[in-house]
Amino acid sequence: KNQVEQSPQSLIILEGKNCTLQCNYTVSPFSNLRWYKQDTGRGPVSLTIMTFSENTKSNGRYTATLDADTKQSSLHITASQLSDSASYICVVSARDAGKSTFGDGTTLTVKP
Amino acid sequence: DVKVTQSSRYLVKRTGEKVFLECVQDMDHENMFWYRQDPGLGLRLIYFSYDVKMKEKGDIPEGYSVSREKKERFSLILESASTNQTSMYLCASSLERTPMKEQFFGPGTRLTVL
């Protein structure tokens, strides 16, 4: 069964600090992995997409990494801002299916 | 910009009522999806559609049905609402069937069934 597990479930950091969110998956055959950001009361918005051959991808202060061998991904946020407070969802898609498998998300709170 | 709109942000219904949730996308996307989002369970796929008048069951279709009469519109129907269907409902669309394509989400409808 395809599964995506994220950790930690929630995280509180001070403004300006860095943090790293984790995603482990068992989806096979692997096609791609996306990180979404979901602000409170809004739908998720895609931050990055990574395919099998990509190890690192950046989007501003967000940097995603992928280790396809260990089936792990991380999302690193640099110099956090209050607006980074949101839920971050890891989504993994298989090559042979139109559906994607969603993680439960990590809720990040950035405090001043 | 892709825009996915949902008919209501908040909805309160009574047990047994028939509930319609409407979703419209304005970018001529082929694929449309309905999810529900619950704390600790993440997003779970209810139904999806790859074309007009076409639908496929997702992971949790029980108690729900869908309708796609036009390409831009995808409706989720709760035939007889129950309290365990209280949830956040999210609609999404994507351009093609391939798994590479990003899903664009609407703002969600928070449904409460009393």
Image (cartoon, helix red, strand yellow):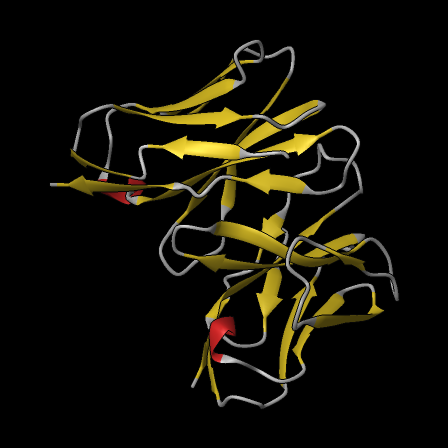
Q: Nearer the viewer, residue A96 or A18?
A: A96
- In the rendered image, which quarter is residue B36 located in? bottom right
Residue A66, given in percent of the width and then of the height, sits at 51, 16
- In the rendered image, which quarter is residue A105 located in? top left
**Residue A46 shown left or right of residue B29 in the figure:** left
- In the rendered image, which quarter is residue B58 located in? bottom right
Residue B32, given in percent of the width and then of the height, sits at 72, 56
Residue located at (39% from left, 50% from top): B40
Q: Nearer the viewer, residue B22 or A15?
A: B22
**Residue A15 shown left or right of residue B70 in the figure:** left
B92 lies above or below A85: below
A103 lies above or below B106: above
Q: Give the residue at the far front of this rendering.
A: A1
Residue located at (64% from left, 26% from top): A32
Q: Nearer the viewer, residue B27 or B16?
A: B16
B104 lies above or below B74: above
User: Across the whole image, how many numbered discs are drawn on residues?
Assistant: 0
Residue A6, given in percent of the width and then of the height, sits at 41, 33
**Residue A19 shown left or right of residue A17 in the figure:** right
Placement of the C terminus of chain B among the 4 image quadrants: bottom left
Residue A35, given in percent of the width and then of the height, sits at 50, 33
**Residue A89 shown left or right of residue B56 in the figure:** left
Residue located at (47% from left, 78% from top): B83
A111 lies above or below B100: below
